[in-house]
């Protein structure tokens, strides 16, 4: 009974004053007119019948002298009837169905499995050349051919698979793993000095030491020989391995002019654009700054749940700069040089494992600028390998 209430029905009300209600009910049963929810309150009889039976129900009531009144009509037929002249609703439904059909054949999601973030950006760029990009038609792309093109364009891939699932394109790849270059430890070689220095310490693991601690060496001198003599007067060749620390000097010159030109930030101009299926549309027309600028942009992707829609809102920022002539004092120039000296020491000297044990600075001052000549005394690794040419026979 409860489920029946969900169907189309007409609820009625009958004034039964002075009439035989039982005769009405029996007649309805004989005519197989189904009625439901009968209730009586005083002389008023209420209930409801199916929408399709209401005409026959009314005729029977009229014959027996009853005058049924319609209290309400309920059901989807009456609900839809209220909108029969509102063409916007069916038109909207049709357009929505067309849009769903259109988007179901469009690439909304691209999933890439088997590589890092940088690799994903590279592969997405290559997929565009294969005709696969956000908003492109899936049915118009031969996925097998695109898979072969992807492998041909990227020599870092050993295998690739491209498949689609609805509006989602899944790309699985496997990158080529390069074999590490094996260092041949059986190749005869010497350890030679990479620069003029004084030997501070040595640790020889293989080979014959040719110098003593405290000796001075010139660039290219053999420190550890790969030719080992035996007590029997014979020689054999080895791959020399050693840690050689030496003390050496290194001279660098740093200059700074008192007159300098620098770019000064003035303001930022922000423009908007939106992207539809990869096609960018600028709002307000094209903008080209007249001064120097740095460009940066950010985009907001519009999504529907986990589905990426082919729409983006793009914010384009132009940071404007102007060239400005400045005059430095001696202190300012020296401060700028100190910063460059610090970067040099951290990145090129101590950053490579060397230790600065002494530093001598000579300053030269002219009307145009200042120059600092720095002579470093450095303690660090000075040994490098050099292959021994072995004569045949």
Image (cartoon, rainbow, N blue to C red):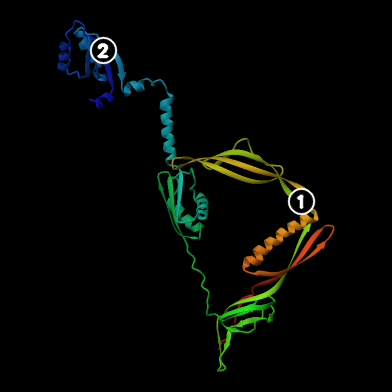
**Position in image of residue 236 (x %, y %):** 55, 87
Residue beneath the point at 56% across and 85% down? 237
The mark found on residue 386 in the picture is none
**Height in image: 181 above or below 166?**
below
Task: Please give left or right for residue 265 compared with residue 163 in the image.
Answer: right
**The N terminus - image quarter:** top left
**Position in image of residue 152 (x %, y %):** 49, 58
User: Which badge, 2 or 1, is on the more N-terminal residue?
Assistant: 2
In this rendering, does residue 390 appear at all? no
| CB-based contact (under 8 Å), mark 2 and mark 1 | no
- Residues 345 and 93: in front is 345
Q: How many marks?
A: 2
**Height in image: 375 above or below 263?**
below
- Determine the residue located farthest toward the top in the rendered image: 18
Q: Quadrant of residue 205?
A: bottom right
Q: Which residue is mark 2?
A: 13
In this rendering, does residue 112 appear at all? yes
- Residues 25 and 335: in front is 335
- Determine the residue located farthest toward the right in the rendered image: 367
**Position in image of residue 309 (x %, y %):** 48, 40
Tell me the element at label 1.
strand
**The C terminus - image quarter:** bottom right
Task: Please give left or right for residue 1 compared with residue 111 in the image.
Answer: left
How far is mark 2 from mark 1, CA to CA?
Answer: 96 Å
Task: Please give left or right for residue 14 compared with residue 285 in the image.
Answer: left
Q: Which residue is mark 1?
A: 261
Task: Please give left or right for residue 389 compared with residue 328 in the image.
Answer: left
Residue beneath the point at 43% across and 46% down? 168
**Position in image of residue 166 (x %, y %):** 40, 44
- Residues 142 and 363: in front is 363
Residue beneath the point at 62% across and 35% down? 284
């Amino acid at each position: 009974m409860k489920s029946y209430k969900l169907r189309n029905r007409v609820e009625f009300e009958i004034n039964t004053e002075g009439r035989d209600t039982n005769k009405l009910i029996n007649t309805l049963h004989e005519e197989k007119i189904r009625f439901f929810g009968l209730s009586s309150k005083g002389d008023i009889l209420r209930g409801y019948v199916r929408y399709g039976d209401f005409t026959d129900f009314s005729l029977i009531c009229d014959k027996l002298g009853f005058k049924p009144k319609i209290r309400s009509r309920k059901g989807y037929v009456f609900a839809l009837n209220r909108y029969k002249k509102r063409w916007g609703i069916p038109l909207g439904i049709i357009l929505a169905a067309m849009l769903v059909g259109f988007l179901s054949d469009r690439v909304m999601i691209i999933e890439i499995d088997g590589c890092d973030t940088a690799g994903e950006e590279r592969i997405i760029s290559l997929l565009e050349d294969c005709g696969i990009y956000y908003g492109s038609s899936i049915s118009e792309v031969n996925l097998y051919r695109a898979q072969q093109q992807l492998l041909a364009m990227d020599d870092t891939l050993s295998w690739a698979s491209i498949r689609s699932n609805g509006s989602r394109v899944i790309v699985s790849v496997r990158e080529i793993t390069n074999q590490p270059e094996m260092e041949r430890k059986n190749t005869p070689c010497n350890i030679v000095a990479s620069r003029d220095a004084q030997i501070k310490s040595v640790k020889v693991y293989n080979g014959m030491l040719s110098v003593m601690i405290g000796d001075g060496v010139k660039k290219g001198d053999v420190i550890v020989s790969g030719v080992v003599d035996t007590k029997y007067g014979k020689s054999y060749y080895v791959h020399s391995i050693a840690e050689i620390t030496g003390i050496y000097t290194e001279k660098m010159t740093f200059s700074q002019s008192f007159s300098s030109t620098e770019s000064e930030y003035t303001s930022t101009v922000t423009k908007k654009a939106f992207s539809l299926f990869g096609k960018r549309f600028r709002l307000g027309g094209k903008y080209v700054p007249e001064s120097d600028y740095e460009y940066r942009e950010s985009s907001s992707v519009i999504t529907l749940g986990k589905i990426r829609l082919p729409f983006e809102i793009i914010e384009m920022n132009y940071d404007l700069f102007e060239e400005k002539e400045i005059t430095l004092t001696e202190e300012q120039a020296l401060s700028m040089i100190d910063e460059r000296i610090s970067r040099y020491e951290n990145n090129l000297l101590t950053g490579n494992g060397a230790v600065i044990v002494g530093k001598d600075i000579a300053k030269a001052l002219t009307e145009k600028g200042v120059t600092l000549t720095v002579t470093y005394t450095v303690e660090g690794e000075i040994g490098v390998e050099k292959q021994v040419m072995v004569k045949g026979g």
